[in-house]
Amino acid sequence: MFDILLKQFVMAEQGLEKPVAKAAEKVAEVASLSEFSNLGYLVASVLFIMGIKGLTHPRTAVRGNLLGAAGMLIAVLVTLVGGQVSWPVAIAGIAVGTAAGTWFANTVQMTQMPQLVALFNGFGGIASVLVAGAEVLRSAPTSGNIAVAGLAAGLAGLIGSVTFTGSLVAAGKLQELSQFKKPFSLPGHQIINAVLIAVTLILCLNMMDGSAWEYFLLTTIALVLGVFLVTPIGGADMPVVIALLNSYSGLAASAAGFVINNNVLIVAGALVGASGIILTNIMCKAMNRSLLNVLFAKFEPSADGPSDDEVYAGKIKSTSPEEVAMLLDGVQRVVVVPGYGLAVAQAQHIVREMATLLESEGVTVEYAIHPVAGRMPGHMNVLLAEADVPYDQLKEMDEINPTFSQCDAAIVIGANDVVNPVANTDPSSPIAGMPILNVGDARTVIVVKRSLSPGFAGIPNPLFAADNCLMLFGDAKQVLMELVAALKDR
């Protein structure tokens, strides 16, 4: 009897060897893949950090962009190799994304970059919403703590949805579509926003149970909230809004990373979120305004402020391209101040041609860059870089302001409030305290502008009526072409 039992035990042991061995091999394989993925994600994260560092200066921006792209490529490849991914679906997605990216790169003009950035922010937001939503539908969050994963899914849905619709509205404003061009608000608009925010936060907390219907209700309300948050904001505040939406897209991605337990998504999202917040803070300081003021207040001229007639009547001195050409004869230093009007007219190339002509005569030409000039942070830098303007000629506001008194001529092209001296002289002005370019200190100021229409603050600019200011009215590109022709003929 004992021999029979021993024989059965040996046979059972031998029968278990193969399954146990296979299980051990499977565990080792998973562990190996996990180590490989974490190592790849670490390399990608380092490249992301180096890429952001490179983007801090125009000279290293291209390299930084390439490093960031390389990091993303590594992250995608590691995810495909180490994850449970349907290769046909992944390849189809990569093909569609590559085709779209190639099309954007070859067709979108440099002046339309702000709109494109806004759309990219929106795409990032909706991607996070879809990823988190897919996990909620599966009812099997990969995070060990279901409550944490559910809360992260709620945050991804909330922030991503607000980012998506808010970015679409911002892109419409930047594109100057008639539906979004002017700020729009309903009676009690801020109360409505407060109610929507409260409801979405409550739903987000309830997501700790991982309820699918609550997630879709949350994202639906958040989509409406994104529209309501951005529609009242004027186009001039878009640099701040774009930076903030960029941060939102990163935070949404980071939250989605917690939902699916993906380290590189958490790190990359955190990097984007943090850098976006820093940039938003820089933009707010440049405008001397708080973020709450940008999001929930309006710039309106004071009822007690001077009217256009009081500021301009009998004081405006108009000039012509021929007169400006003669005025620039014999000057030693010229500072060009680009504004959004330059971008609208797409006059960056003719500005570069004008500068080249002046430089051939021994004139020093520089460009004064205000932090919030244009429609997004760095917009003027990008436009001038497209026209091959040397980086060392681009001067930040703090660097060039003390030197305007040694400037023979300051040529302001399409800028308004960023050169309005009222910011320094009238405490009741809507732009009181906002740092400006002190172009009025130059010996002569030439303002290229279509008309005397006000900027986003809705107030007149006394600079235009100053004794040393000449107004060159017309489309920036057209009048500068005439100025270049006059410079060649003199």
Image (cartoon, rainbow, N blue to C red):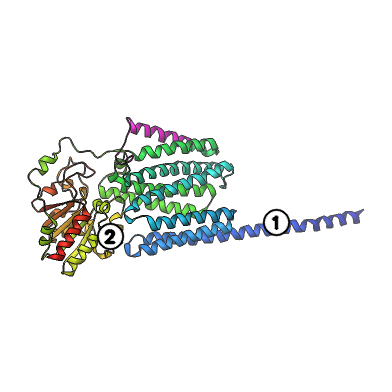
Quarter of the picture containing the C terminus is: bottom left
Q: Is residue 328 something that shows in the picture?
A: yes
Q: Position of residue 133 (x, y in %)?
A: 52, 43
What amino acid is labelled 1 in the image? Answer: Ala
Spot the residue most to the top: 187
Q: Quadrant of residue 402?
A: bottom left
The stretch in magenta equals 178-203
Under circle 1, the secondary element is helix
Under circle 2, the secondary element is helix
Compared with 213, 123 (above or below) is: below
| Left or right placement of residue 99 versus residue 369 in this view | right
| Left or right placement of residue 334 versus residue 188 in this view | left
Q: At x 13% / y 53%, what residue is drawn?
A: 440
Q: Position of residue 297 (x, y in %)?
A: 28, 38
Badge 2 is on which residue? 384
Q: At x 29% / y 57%, what residue is drawn?
A: 383
Q: At x 22% / y 63%, what residue is drawn?
A: 353
Q: Nearer the viewer, residue 36 or 82?
A: 82
Badge 1 is on which residue? 23
State yes or no: discs 1 and 2 in contact (Cβ < 8 Å).
no
| Left or right placement of residue 53 versus residue 415 in this view | right
Compared with 272, 334 (above or below) is: below
